[in-house]
Amino acid sequence: MIRYTVYAITTANIQGIKDLPDYVKDYPQQLEERTHRNENRQVVVQGPYWSEDGKNAVAVVSSQDNKDRWMMRLDAQTGQLALLDRQRDEAWIAGPGIGGGYSGGNIGWLDNTHFYYQSEASGYSHIYVADVTTGAKKQITSGNWEVQTLQLSNDKKTFYFTANLEHPGITHFYRLPVTGGTPVQLTGMKGGNEVSLSSDEKWLAIRYSYSNKPWELYLQPNKAKARATQITHSTTAEFESYPWRAPEVITFKNRYGSTVYARLYVPKQADPAKPAVIFVHGAGYLQNVHYWWSSYSHEYMFHNLLADKGYTVLDIDYTGSAGYGRNWRTGIYRHMGGKDLDDQVDGAKLLVEKYGVNPKHIGIYGGSYGGFMTLMAMFTTPDVFAAGAALRSVTDWAHYNHGYTSDILNEPYNDEKAYKLSSPIYFANGLKGKLLLCHGMVDQNVNYQDIVRLEQKLIELHKDNWTLASYPVEDHGFVQPSSWADEYKRIYKLFEETLKQ
């Protein structure tokens, strides 16, 4: 006879379940009220994940305020939890392979007593193994690089993973015994290597690209230094007729002493006005300074055009970008448009001091988060940028989605200061240069109403140095070629008219 029993997992006794985030100290009344209530924080439980013999189970518990992630051993008889690992982050829990909210991340069992997972405890996302019977933990990989994908071999003796061990902008596929040691690099082509392992683990299917060569499919035996054979050819003769640039990947120090990575496009012959354009990638947490084909292919092609026309172009992996570890990832906590914008301004300074750019002829543009950054640049550092094109921009983070903003800015009703400090609409009076706004009217990510509110604000401020181009059939990511062409014609015209005068 089988008996089914339903009961709740007990989370009330988890270590730190009542801990308040540090930012609450900025709000004395809120701190007093929440301390007095002494409530358990709300959590999300993923799992349980059972060992093969069914004797052990692990639950991944994440706090809904995004500050904690616990690996817990579950006693199936009682519903009680015992701590295996706690990762606390006063900014927010995230990073490659870690998950958050409703994702458990890269996790699994090596055997009936050892559970693996990823954590940013060291400052970079690495592999850890916990013995669920003794509580002992071991860090399997280490270094100033990230494990970005992770899978276990069929015999559960080897980890296969993608990492940027060689350089932040180069990914390779590695193997490593689950007990640790030195990773063995399997792929050999410089650039981006996205690998699928065959079911018998004898072959690697590699999706590979370089900065000026789009993605192609390769096959390689699962051996170090083996030759990869290209099996697709996707580019046309027309595409290949143009000498696409491989932008130089450079580094510079920002005002805080941190190393910033950037892509640089230098014209063969600079225009006499010595203009420059800084591109700001979207998403915030995204990497665009690398040696593989950019997901911003339209922008890459546009940057080639700008360089042909005498512009110097700089594309920065600013604070908050992916690929550089926890501290870089969380550097925008509670102030978007702070250190990330400082990196753009410091990049502009680099262009003037090292590459001979005219400081009065620097423009900036970007979409989504890049559009938001363009607005912050034009409103709060108006003497640095003569022109800006803000595409599908967030203008007020309190109007954006909870899943994104609650990580970085907490909630508007709990951390009003962070939202006011980070939202362009509060700084619109600072606009001096020429500003182009472009927005799709059926945008379901950054709603069209967002740009309309900013439009009204600029009208009320009696600003007349801006224009808005609306795209009636476009969502957040444009689809129609005519819309892409129209948008980039407007951006190009803006720069031509303002940066070459």
Image (spheres, helix red, strand yellow):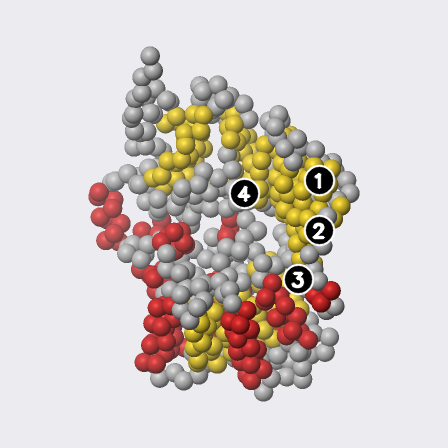
* Residue 250: mark: 3
Q: Amino acid at mark 3?
A: Ile
* Number of numbered discs: 4
Q: Which is more N-terminal, label 4 or label 3?
A: 4
Q: Report the amino acid beneath label 4.
A: Ser
Name the side, left or right, on which 219 lies relative to 10. Answer: right
Query: Mark 2 = which residue?
Result: 232
Quote the CA–CA distance across marks 2 and 3. 31 Å
Query: Quick check: marks 3 and 4 in contact, CB under 8 Å?
Result: no
Query: Mark 4 — residue?
Result: 125
- 2 or 4: mark nearer the eye: 2
Dividing the picture into quadrants, the one containing residue 492 is bottom right
Q: Position of residue 190 (x, y in %)?
A: 71, 51
Whether residue 355 appears in this view of the structure is: no
Q: Residues within 10 Å of mark 2 (few under 14, many from 20)?
A: few
Q: Amino acid at mark 2?
A: Thr
Q: In the rendered view of the protein, which quadrant contains the N terminus?
A: top left
- Tell me the element at label 3: strand
When the figure is inspected, residue 482 is found, relative to residue 25, above or below; the finding is below
Task: Read off the residue under disc 1.
Answer: 186
Query: Counting other residues with Cα less than 10 Å from the Cα at mark 3, is it few (<14), some (14-19), or many (20 or more)?
Result: some
Q: Earlier in the sequence, mark 1 or mark 3?
A: 1
Q: Secondary structure at mark 2?
A: loop
Q: Amino acid at mark 1?
A: Leu
Q: Tell me if label 1 and label 4 are in contact, CB under 8 Å.
A: no
Callout 4: 10 Å neighbours few (<14), some, many (20+)? Answer: many
Front one among 89 and 410: 410
Nearer the observer, disc 1 or disc 4? 1
Give the mark nearest the N terminus, 2 or 3. Answer: 2
